[in-house]
Amino acid sequence: MARTKEENRLIKNKKQREYNKTHRKEQREYSKKYKETHKKTQNEMKEYRKKLKTDETTIYKNALRKKEREENYKIQPIVKRTNEEQKQHELQLGKEYREKNKERLNEYQRKWKREWRKENKEHCRKYQNEYRLKNKEKVTKRNRTQYYKDIYKTWARATIYTHKRRKTEITISLEELTTHAKNTKRCMYCHKPLSWGKNGKVKSNSPTIDRMNNNKTIDSIWNGEKVTTNMGAIVCHSCNCGKGEQTMTEWIDRCKKIICKWG
C-alpha cells in the first residue's frame, strides 16, 4: 500500500535522529576545529591592520587614494539635452577619443583590412576593375602625382614587383633600393648617364637591374667593388639587353671580340 505524507515525514525524522546519534561526536570535533582556525585568522588580520595603520607609507597611499576617489566620483550636475544636442555631444566625445588613440586605432584597422582582403580577393579585384573603368581620369591623375613625388621609390617598387613575377627572389628592402637608386646617376657598365624620366617610356638609357651572374636571387647591389654570387647592378636598358642571359665573364669576352674586330 502507498504511504501518506505524514508517514513519510515521520520515517525521515527517525532516520535523521539515528544519524545524529551516531555522528554527534564527529560534528562536535569539526565545529571546535573550525572555531579555533577562524579565531586565529581573525587575530592575525587584526594585528596586520594595526601595523598598517602605524606605517607612514600606507598612510600616504591611502590619502592619495581618497583624493583620487573624490575627484573621480564627484557628483556632476544633471544636464538636460535635446536629441540634436545629444548627438553633437556624442560626436565630440568620439573625436576626442580618436585624437587620443590614433596609433592604436590605425594599427587595428590595418590588421582588419589585411585579413579581410586575403579572405575576399576576388571581390577586391572586381571592385578595382570596375572603379578604374568608371574613373579613368582620376586614376591617371593619382598615379602621376604619386610618380612625381618620388621617382626613385616608384622605380624600386616596380622593379621588385616585376622580378617577383619572373620568379626571382629579392631580399633587399624597398628603402635600401631607393637609396642606391638616388646615389647611382650613371650606368655601372658603360658609364652612361641614366634618365630618371617622368614620361614613363622605356629608353636606351633608362635604369634597370641586371643579375650579374644570372642567379635567381639578389641579395645586394654592386657599388664598383668586389662581386659576389647573388648580386645585382643598376644598369642602362641597352647594356642589360646586350648582356642577356650571359655571365659577366662571357659578356666581357664577347665585348673584347667585338672590339678586336671593329676597333
Image (cartoon, helix red, strand yellow):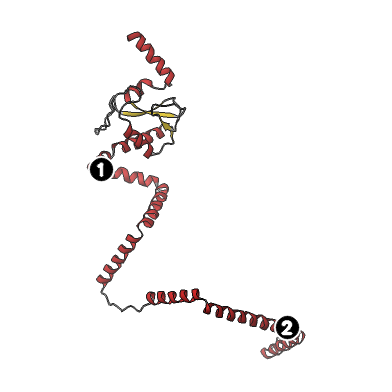
The single residue placed furthest to the right in the displayed view is 22
Answer with mark 2 or mark 1, whichever residue precedes in sequence. Answer: 2
Q: Which mark is residue 193?
A: none
From mark 2 to mark 1, how far is it between C-alphas? 87 Å
* Residue at the (41%, 52%) spot, across then down: 111
Q: Quadrant of residue 230?
A: top left
Q: Quadrant of the N terminus?
A: bottom right
Could you tell me the amino acid type at mark 2? Glu
**Up-down: is 180 above or below 118?**
above
Q: Residues within 10 Å of mark 2 (few under 14, many from 20)?
A: few
> Percent x, y for residue 3?
70, 87
* Residue at the (34%, 29%) spot, across then down: 208
> Percent x, y for residue 179?
35, 36
Say which element carries label 2: helix
Q: Quadrant of the C terminus?
A: top left
Query: Residue under circle 1?
Result: 142
> Percent x, y for residue 55?
52, 76
Q: Residues within 10 Å of mark 1 (few under 14, many from 20)?
A: few
The single residue placed furthest to the top in the displayed view is 261
Q: Closer to the camera, 70 or 166?
A: 70
* Residue at the (41%, 36%) spot, across then down: 172
Q: Quadrant of residue 97?
A: bottom left
Q: Closer to the camera, 51 or 77?
A: 51
Query: Residue under circle 2?
Result: 29
Say which element carries label 1: helix
Q: Closer to the camera, 59 or 123?
A: 59
Q: Quadrant of residue 43?
A: bottom right
Viewer-side label of 2, 1: 2
Could you tell me the amino acid type at mark 1? Arg
